[in-house]
Amino acid sequence: MKNSAQLTLRSVTASLVVSGLALGGCSEEPAADTGVSTVSTTEAPAGTSAVALKSWTGSQTITLDGDVSEWPEDIAAVADANWLYLRFKLDGPTRTLQGMDSAMAIYIDADGNPQTGRTIDEPAVQGGLGADIEVIFSPREPDAPRVGSGVMFRVQTPDGTARTIPHERLGFSFTPTHAAEWYEARIARSAAEELGLNTQGLGSSGRIAGVVVMFDGQGQVDAWADPFEVAAPSASPLEFQDVRVPAKPDDAVRVVTYNVEHSSPVKNPEPFARLIRVLDPDVLLFQEWVEGDADALKAWLTAHVDDTADWQVLKGSAWGVAVASKHPLSSLTPMDAPNPVNSDNALRFVSGLVETPFGPLAVGSTHLKCCGTKDSREDRQRSAEATAIADMLANALGEGPGSQAWGLVIGGDMNLVGSRPPLDALAKGCDLDGSELLVSEPMRLGDHAMYTWFDPGSAYTPGRLDYLLYSDAVAEAVNSFVLDTSVMSEAALARLGLDADDTSNSDHLPVVLDVRPSK
């Protein structure tokens, strides 16, 4: 017996509509008849055909941010002119999709033709399903870039040729990168023609179909959701955007967090200098600026960014974390505090008190432990580090100069590739009234997606690893955004004095928050 999570098969005809899938094996009581198809989970013999139920039409703006609250109930997939969007959930304990004990796959019949692509026999789909695109999370295939982790992509062209491709060929991304109840994903519709697939459906207009399946430890299909179906509108190629960088308000402080990937600005200064000049931050929170001490970083900022500013820098021995400010800056918490898990290493955290025109603002830069999955050793270390940072800040803000701060901003590379609790631990009790900090929600300028890390060719897909948190009890956010030059039009780049590949010189993107005292 195979577990089949019986969600409705939806034929979506309006653009910008999304829908939901679920996987699992427990039963739910049927709901009263409201005229809307309800979700139920049943057991069905292997080979049982999926059944098309009621259709749904409507419109909805999609943002790839990990929050599915705006999605219409029971709607599983939608295509607008540029993207195919999906959402799905895995019943039972939450898992890290790129590091599960068994694989999960999304089979996509990109041209709506079951005669092309790899024939999917289990689950049996009414009318048949030919997978032109396979998205395999935590793959076990021997040709996967990283067996058992990351995401693998396989396409099969109409002539029967199958090959693996990197994620950027599909424009694929999903969110969140950490374990969660619901996930959102998208694929660029322009990928169909570029990959040599039939252009019907994904590449132009018409039917797109698919199904999400789970595998057991032996690679056998173990569970699945009901198939999804989309009547896609006409496709359009992705266009570069006339991005406008929001101006920093006169009554706000601009804070930028930026992981610069192994001191890349030292080796190649101009792209980073251009970006920092355009963003014009008051405070910079750096990670992975490994080379040199505080004086060397100050000299770099003076030489390459602004030689009229009296840059102030805090940088200890902790690997690559630093705070730089155009305003007077003093230490807030002890420099080079021991890591709570390994006391031989310094905690990757630096904090300071910035004397802004509106009074002192507390800021902190951190780089939590990398790697691992939910509940792994690395994930537990991230939580321990975040708790230690929150305790240090609570003490510093409760007495001495820190008690005069009008706000707090913490930012950095949180490496949330396991679970969310490390971020929650960092936020807990750190607001100036003892409540939790608020996590800012920055979108990429020129896009409806919220990711901050991108590495072409990697087994791991773009994700949101960098965060900014602030004390919303006493301060308010004015602007919050992520800058990515790869989506900008030539006119926008020329206006800003940037190059299209400027942000590609690090695998992380700069994340910006404008914050001011509450009025």
Image (spheres, rainbow, N blue to C red):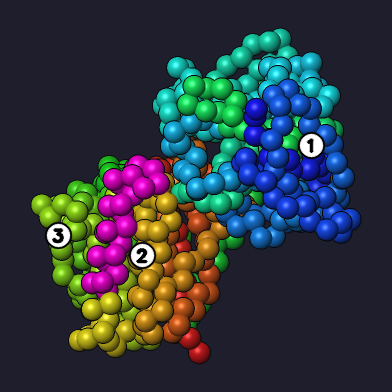
In three-dimensional space, the C-alpha distance between marks 1 and 2, rounded to whole angstroms, equals 40 Å
The furthest residue to the left: 344
Residue 303, given in percent of the width and then of the height, sits at 26, 57
Q: Tell me if residue 385 is in the magenta stretch.
A: yes
Which of the 4 image quadrants contains residue 60? bottom right
Q: Check disc 1 and report the residue beneath it.
A: 229
Q: Amino acid at mark 3?
A: Pro
Residue 162, given in percent of the width and then of the height, sits at 61, 14
Q: Amino acid at mark 2?
A: Ala
If the image is split into quadrants, where does the N terminus sit?
top right
Q: For residue 78, say whether it is visible.
A: yes
Earlier residue among tags 3 and 2: 3
**Vertical order, 180 against 157 (above or below):** below
Q: Give the class, few, some or many, for how many residues have Cα within 10 Å of label 2's Cα (few <14, many ≥20).
A: many
Of marks 3 and 2, the one in the foreground: 2
Earlier residue among tags 1 and 3: 1
Disc 3, SS: loop
Query: In the image, what residue occupies the spot 32% across and 57% down?
Result: 383
410 sits to left or right of 291: right
Q: Amino acid at mark 1?
A: Glu
Residue 215, given in percent of the width and then of the height, sits at 55, 28
Extent of the magenta region? 370-393
Residue 133, given in percent of the width and then of the height, sits at 65, 26
In three-dimensional space, the C-alpha distance between marks 3 and 2, rounded to whole angstroms, equals 18 Å
Predominant secondary structure, magenta span:
helix
Residue 207 - label? none
Q: Check disc 2 and report the residue beneath it.
A: 425
Residue 338 - label? 3
Residue 357 or residue 4, whichever sits in front: 4
Residue 21 or residue 262, whichever sits in front: 21
Q: Tell me if residue 123 is in the magenta stretch.
A: no
Q: Give the class, few, some or many, for how many residues have Cα within 10 Å of label 3's Cα (few <14, many ≥20).
A: some
